[in-house]
Amino acid sequence: MTVDVRTFGCRLNIAESEVIKREAQAAGITDAVVFNTCAVTAEAVKQARQSIRRTRREKPDTTIIVTGCAAQADSAPFAAMPEVNRVLGNEEKLSAAAWRGEERVAVGDIMASTHIKAHGVDHIDGHTRAFVQVQNGCDHRCTFCIIPFGRGNSRSLSIDDVVAQARRLTVNGYREIVLTGVDITSYRDGDLKLGALVKRLLRAVPEIARLRLSSIDSVEADADLLDALANEPRLMPHLHLSLQAGDDMILKRMKRRHSRAEAIAFCNEVRRLRPDVVFGADIIAGFPTETEAMFQRSLDLVDDCGLTQLHVFPFSPRPGTPASRMPQLDRAVIKERAQRLRDRGEAALRGHLDAQVGATHRVLTERGGIARTEQFTPVRLNSPLAPGLFLDLTMASHDGRQLLAA
């Protein structure tokens, strides 16, 4: 073993893990396990710490290096762990010079970062689709979120750099590209926004068979992006929305920039432009001060927006955020509301799957006998096939979680 990177969290971390592996190996690092951590919830940090301890027990002689958002936002607890040899910040993890250094804790001021370097990733290990970073950081300060302190302020790659990276990946056989970042709807290249990037990318790289977007903030979706959704069939009809709540007062206390009505209106407009679109969403259960009536509006948002895939987050206070100082709900209440949200999401998914039975979809095969429709719905194949194949399959049934091919 040379460098084994354990990735936690988002697609951006997955893309960056490829750079970590390359830069660490180029610096001569050997027999090392690197933990590329996530800070979005307290549970994510807890899981990273547990994995670090388990790895030290299993590999007592290996070098353990911790990086990622949790290490950037609060390096001291990781530096204090006897199992950890080094801690690197989010900028340092992508720097060959930092990997060649010997400083035990190398975590710089992420807020001083003003640009992104195009790292030229050639492949994404273990993945059928390739993740292309277009943006990093966030200029917004949602009261529950620690991520800006792990990622810094918003900054974007140039369109030319994004195109060059997508070309490199398609040459290496990737047919599906996912644009990723921390807040990709804040993308800017001069006056050009995300929609202009999407249109230019599809024109410049015809080898891209499918283009997807990672999580977006609906309030920042620009006219070009809506036009692309309506008129670019290679831009997939699946959007994951950062909604977080369905009650206007809770949205205000979260310091979100959209209202309940605006979220519903956005989904209705996109569905008018692209009738086959499906929506996923992030929703937090049990935000401080949330009453039962407020929570009910989040439950109702599943139907009102026509959501089919939910990422439910039981609220967990992150030290240093305004929400951690607000009146907290009982953990049992938070847990119960999160389960009700998950139940509503599972019912919505079953409704979506019911509607697909008997339909024929073009799917892209993945590892493990799974494929994905254009709407990102998983399909269980009758037998495992090589990843990266496009097939037209009729859906015979479903098991409540995925479609089953005929």
Image (tube, rainbow, N blue to C red):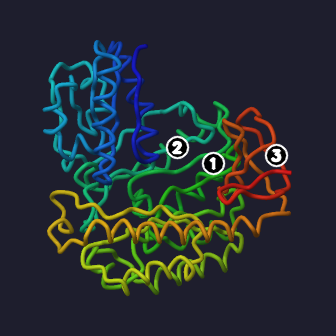
Q: Are marks 3 and 1 in contact (CB under 8 Å)?
A: no
Left or right of residue 77: residue 211: right
User: Who is closer to the viewer here, 373 or 209?
Assistant: 373
Query: Which residue is farthest front?
Result: 332
Q: Badge 1 local density, few (<14 within 10 Å), some, or many (20+)?
A: some
Q: Which residue is mark 2?
A: 131
First in sequence: mark 2 vs mark 1: 2
Of tags 3 and 2, the one toward the viewer is 3
Identify the residue at horizontal 36%, vertical 83% (top origin). Answer: 292
* Residue 199 percent location from the top left of the image: 60, 59
Tell me, for residue 88, which label it has, or none: none
**368 in relation to 188, above or below:** above
Q: CA distance from mark 3 to mark 1?
A: 25 Å
User: Who is closer to the viewer here, 323 or 364?
Assistant: 323
Going by the numbered disc 2, the residue's amino acid type is Phe
Going by the numbered disc 1, the residue's amino acid type is Ala
Q: Which residue is mark 3?
A: 391
Identify the residue at horizontal 44%, vertical 49% (top origin). Answer: 158
Q: Which residue is mark 1?
A: 204
* Residue 380 percent location from the top left of the image: 73, 47
Mark 1 residue element = helix
Q: CA distance from mark 3 to mark 2?
A: 22 Å
Identify the residue at horizontal 65%, vertical 32% (top origin). Answer: 171
First in sequence: mark 3 vs mark 1: 1
Left or right of residue 289: residue 79: left
Mark 2 residue element = strand
